[in-house]
Amino acid sequence: MSYFNVISKSVLQEIKYHLPFYLLLTAILSLALFIRVYRAEDLLGFYYDQGRDALVIWRFWYNRDFFLIGPVTGLMGIYLGPFYYLLIAPLYLIGGGSPVYPAVFLSFLSVIALFILYLLGQEMHSKAGGLIAATIGGFSFYIFTHSRWLSNPNPILLTSVILLYAMWKIVANRDASKRIVPGPENLQLGRWLIVALTVGLSLQLEAASAVFYIPSVLVFVIWIYWSDFKYKRYLQNLLRSKTFILALSTFFITFIPQIVFNFLHENILFENLYKLFIDERAFRGFGKFVFEERLKFFFALPNKFFIGQSLKTLVFTSFVLSTFIVRRKYLKVGMLKFFSIFLIIPMLGYLLFQGNFGNIYDYYLSGYFLPFILLFSIGLAELAHTKVGRFVVLIFLYQFIKLNAPYIGRYLSADEPHERPIVLEDQLKGVGWVFGDVKDRGNFNVDVYVPPVIPYSYDYLFLWQGSKKCGRDLCGQVDEKVPLLYTLYEEDPPHPERLQAWLERQKGIAMVEKEEKFGQITVQRRKRL
């Protein structure tokens, strides 16, 4: 009997003997997928970043304009690798240019991440631990919205748990065998290659998260082989080993496109990195102000449970932490050390990081959301072994669902403009109105105002819809000035003076002949003066 057949038989027997449990898991994952793809076109946020990315991919498919880099980071002049664009580009092609296809695809990847999260919970602790983790990850409002986000930090939810899974398999096999190279050599080599590859690819998704994977993996290697590092000859052999060489090569291969881009553009990436880390001293000692601000930032992890409920978050987190202390001897060997390496090292890194004018944002922690949820869930599952603990777990789950479910429900049912932000549905109605109104009127221009100033989203939507309706002619949309002008603008509540100034300029350019509103979007047909 083949290895594959043995595994298949084992899986089928496992499902047979625990059928109710796996039906519940299937229901959780199915519902998590449903809420992530429901009304995807209606509620998709398609703004500056999404339009910019879509334009790059459009030029790739239709103009053969190849790319070696991906989106720009929040750090000036530093670009990610092209992996995110390569990941979603086929979905834009399959969908005929529709951003809904890649958005749904990314949501699907987030549910795969939840399944791997369950597997991790099961292997690290118990089925209950995995199920709790999948439930929290599936129905946390923040993780839910992050999973519907058409942006490069989204897929790091998946790569983070793949990385965690590969590293844990290395830990588990080491503890079981106590050998320097535990388990089948090729299998262990494969795990290290997955570690190297996922770190490299994660750096192309959300560098602010994945940059701390590097020191974490280095400390992890030292921990795994600590007892052997005292022998100098062993260290030399390790550095020359097939596993080390292949893993390091795999990691650096992921940087080849950026390296090529860098040398084709006068060393621009290396110079910007040097400026950030050396000239501007991105990592340095911190004072009281930075320390206090970073402590607030770290609440972004536990706050994924209870939106804006800091007291509840603090209470339940305290219960879980006390569980790890009181029942530590019941946990699997090495588990707490493993999580300490994966979660504490990045926290220290964020404390020391003061680049980007000291600004850091919640999504910088994208690569740690699900690992933290897993740790918390394991704590809850262990807490459930006591009578008081079972009560606490039930209260937590009740409060968690009670708080998050209404937020998710309101998000998915929002129809009125004041209930939701500007979404793709309204944008397509506005763009569609222009193409419907311009019929038989000849060539026309478009002028757009959006709060981020650069209207990449509408540049793409007019290009996509114009090509879809009229091919390369774009239904008469041209760059040179013609008498017929369409203006489109979004409401800008934080800066109404900017919008007003833009409208005043338009008065001196063309007069309004017709106007329509679609939610918070206004579209006008104008005739140049």
Image (cartoon, rainbow, N blue to C red):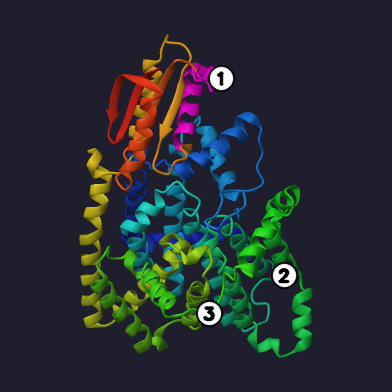
Q: Residues within 10 Å of mark 3 (few under 14, many from 20)?
A: few
Kind of element beneath mark 2: helix
Q: Residue at x 40, y 85 (%)?
A: 330
Q: Residues within 10 Å of mark 1 (few under 14, many from 20)?
A: few
Q: Residues within 10 Å of mark 2 (few under 14, many from 20)?
A: many
- Judge from the rendering whether residue 87 lies leftward or rightward of residue 260; answer left or right: left
Kind of element beneath mark 3: loop
Residue pushed farthest front? 508
Could you tell me residue 243's position as x and y percent? 72, 70
Q: Which residue type does callout 1 highlight?
A: Arg
Residue 243, disc? 2
Q: Residue at x 56, y 49 (%)?
A: 71
Question: Which span is picked out in magenta?
Answer: 457-481
Q: Which residue type does callout 3 highlight?
A: Gly
The answer to whether mark 1 and mark 3 are in CB contact below 8 A is: no
Residue 458 appears in the figure: yes
Counting residues from the start of the chain, the first of labels 2 and 1 encountered is: 2
Which residue has dot 1 on it?
A: 472
Counting residues from the start of the chain, the first of labels 3 and 2 encountered is: 2
Question: Disc 1 and disc 3: Cα gap in Å?
Answer: 56 Å
Could you tell me residue 145's position as x and y percent? 36, 52
Residue 498, disc? none
- Judge from the rendering whether residue 259 lies leftward or rightward of residue 489; answer left or right: right
Q: Nearer the viewer, mark 1 or mark 3?
A: 3
Residue pushed farthest top? 440
Kind of element beneath mark 1: helix
Which residue has dot 3 on it?
A: 285
Q: Residue at x 76, y 69 (%)?
A: 242
Q: Which residue type does callout 2 highlight?
A: Thr
Residue 474 shown in magenta: yes
The answer to whether mark 2 and mark 1 are in CB contact below 8 A is: no
Counting residues from the start of the chain, the first of labels 1 and 3 encountered is: 3
